[in-house]
Amino acid sequence: MNLYLIIFNADTYRKEQVYEAHKSLFVALEKYFTLHLVNYTQTDDIPSNAYKLAFIASGGVESAVVRNFSLLPYPITLLTDGSNNSLAAALEISAWIRTRDMKVKIIHGHPDEMVKQVLLHHKAFAAKRSLKNKRIGVVGTPAPWLVSSHVDYLLAGQRWGVSYVDIPIEEVEKNFYNTTDDEIGMEASRLVSRVKAIQDVTPEDLYRAMRLHKAVKDVCTKHKLSAATVSCFSLIQTLKTTGCLALSLLNDEGIPAGCEGDLQSIMTLLMVKELTGQPGFMANPSFIDTKRNEVLLAHCSIPTTMTDEFIIRTQFESETGIGIQGIMHEGEVTLFKCGGECLDEYFVSAGYLTANTNLVTCCRTQVTVKLNNPVSYFLQNPLGNHHILIKGNHTEAIQEFMQQNRCKQRE
């Protein structure tokens, strides 16, 4: 990974002297990055899409930074180790920037801590860059009950660089009917070999669900989609199957896929993949326990790779087709949602998955999570229904990513 440091130094610029003066930090950074030290007067040599930070190397550079403010990489982050009055200069520069109603962050501390912060900063930078030109397929129309999950395609594209692509549900239906059982027989057999149990599901149910998986995947290939959200409930009437298994397997295969045509949740799933490399479990908060600060999350589709074992059952609401009951082990998790019509708000909290349940009143996969942040958020200021569960604690990376992109946190 390349890191270009735009050097602001009060003395005559000599690369070797700058390196020696800040050697502890630079050596620590070079464990992870190929370091390029570039004087602020020579920034034309930096590739336009490179990862770069402003490095305040000494005091006395405040006026130079103000005069060359347009050179500062956005979002504005100042890197300084404190040598030669550099922290004092960074503080003055930061205050000046804030008087212009702009955000600025200072990365400072011991070298190891600074490197940790730079790595988080770079992860967010790389995730944003990878989102550019991604295509999100909206197959069919969003479910009518998702009254607060709309997205302004234009504003979302301007903020994140993604494109939402409307695709008629009839394309999936056509692919479904053109798919033979022979084409998906081997894959169905491999799936059955992995399940813990099958309940109330016939071989025909399984084959229809697997044909739908191939039908949606073919649409993703044809339209060059990076992710897709499917109006899955409408398919119950036309294809006599549910989308739960198809979406689960697509997520397993690295294609974020969401239910019910939810425009906000599919963007969240795509963010999760680009930021963490993991799939997410798109779920309904089904019960809130404020005394224990716990939330019960449930849905009928979960990536099988997130589970320790899984059971194939019918879908909960329709009692037809296929739903997945996934069993997850206890451990650290993250709950995340990017929402708002412009995709400029978010909720995130670390937590601990404490239990799997099997209630008859909820969707098939059910997990109880004790959150670090107050669960009262769901009752007082929620970003809609669906939220995304991720294995492991990724709150630092998500916070850095969302803050870099000027998003407002809900609590």
Image: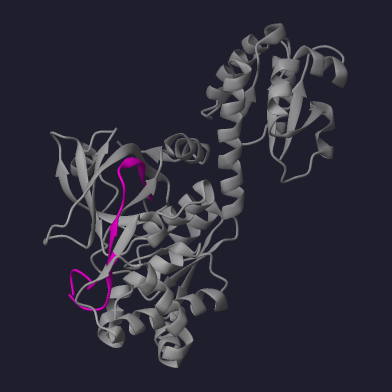
The front one of 155 and 30 is 30
What is the number of callouts on the image?
0
Please tell me in which quadrant of the rendered image residue 112 appears. top right
Please tell me in which quadrant of the rendered image residue 198 appears. bottom left
The answer to whether 356 is drawn above or below residue 78 in the figure is below
Question: What segment carries the magenta color?
Answer: 311-338
Q: For this view, does 175 lie left or right of residue 353?
A: right
Residue drawn at x 71%, y 16% is 24
Residue 55 % position (x, y) = 70, 23
Residue 377 % position (x, y) = 24, 39
The front one of 344 and 317 is 317
Extreme-top residue of the structure: 85
Please tell me in which quadrant of the rendered image residue 245 appears. bottom left
In the rendered image, the quadrant that contains the N terminus is top right
The answer to whether 58 is drawn above or below residue 397 in the figure is above
The front one of 257 and 339 is 257
The answer to whether 112 is drawn above or below residue 173 in the figure is above
In the rendered image, the quadrant that contains the C terminus is top left
- Residue 224 visible in the displayed image: yes
Residue 22 % position (x, y) = 74, 15
